[in-house]
Amino acid sequence: RVTGSCGTVTSTARTLTVNGPTAIISHPSAQFIGAGQNASFSVGASGASLSYQWQRRNHGSSTWSNVTNGGVFSGATTATLTLTNVPGSLHNTFYRARVTGACGSAVNSDEAALRVISADNGCGGSDPLPNPPGTSCGTCGTYQCSGSNNTVCVGSTDTQTDPQNCGTCGNDCGPNFDCLNGGCICGFELCATGSQVCCDCFEFSPTPSFPKRCAFSNADCASICSGMFEP
């Protein structure tokens, strides 16, 4: 309002807006979900012309990286970050929002953890296993539990020499027979008088009555071990 010698005039009214500094007023909360479920993190902020950027760090790391939309992530530049069909590999990751406004510096929310609890992995634990128990490994071997969150290969063998897996897995040559070059052969039978081993089985000769027949190496052994095998 201006007054002069010739009268008074009043200017047009205008509004003065004073923006406060950018501030976080509510922080994201930790999320506990099962593998394949959804999760979301939200932040509340005050200030003018606010923009948002969600960030993530891995367990054991102090480095934060910006989250981008795609895959399981959406809303990476909004007040709510959404994760859809979350895999077990994101277990123990951490999230925070970085908020920028018209006044003051950018501010960070507190971090919030994501815990993805997987179904029983077959060994009594919850961590996903790259080699689940019971799956094949090596030759004729299988992965078996070693603790609650680990498996090791057990039973891998050489089918050229293993009499229980001769030539192919599960082909058992049977008692007194060995495996040579992937085929069942007569083994060494302890047929003795005192401490002297007498019989040396050397021939594999299948017959209807003796599917795995051992032939003795000489007549002396045949007489001592009479009846043990068909000579």
Image (cartoon, rainbow, N blue to C red):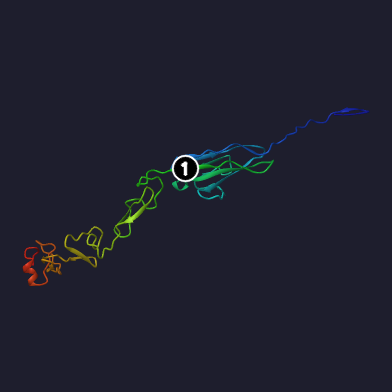
Residue 100 drawn at (x, y percent) = 64, 43
Please tell me how many numbered marks the rendered image carries.
Answer: 1
Dot 1: element: strand
Task: Identify the residue at image location x=11%, y=64%.
Answer: 207
Q: Residue furthest right?
A: 5
Vertical position of residue 178 compared to residue 121: above or below = below
Of residues 54 and 194, the one drawn nearer to the viewer in this rendering? 194
Vertical position of residue 221 compared to residue 99: above or below = below
Task: Identify the residue at image location x=51%, y=42%.
Answer: 113
Q: Residue furthest top?
A: 7
* Residue 83 makes an appearance in the image: no
Residue 64 drawn at (x, y percent) = 56, 49
Residue type at the position of mark 1 = Arg
* Residue 124 makes an appearance in the image: yes
Q: Which residue is mark 1?
A: 115
Of residues 25 and 208, the one drawn nearer to the viewer in this rendering? 25
Quadrant in which the C terminus is drawn: bottom left
Q: Residue furthest bottom?
A: 218
Task: Identify the residue at image location x=49%, y=43%.
Answer: 114
- In the image, taking residue 77 as reference, residue 224 lies left or right, namely left
Residue 167 drawn at (x, y percent) = 24, 63
Of residues 217 and 96, the one drawn nearer to the viewer in this rendering? 217
Task: Identify the residue at image location x=9%, y=69%.
Answer: 221
- In the image, taking residue 80 as reference, residue 160 lies left or right, namely left
Report which quarter residue 224 is drawn in. bottom left
Quadrant in which the N terminus is drawn: top right
Residue 178 drawn at (x, y percent) = 20, 64
Q: Residues within 10 Å of mark 1 (few under 14, many from 20)?
A: some
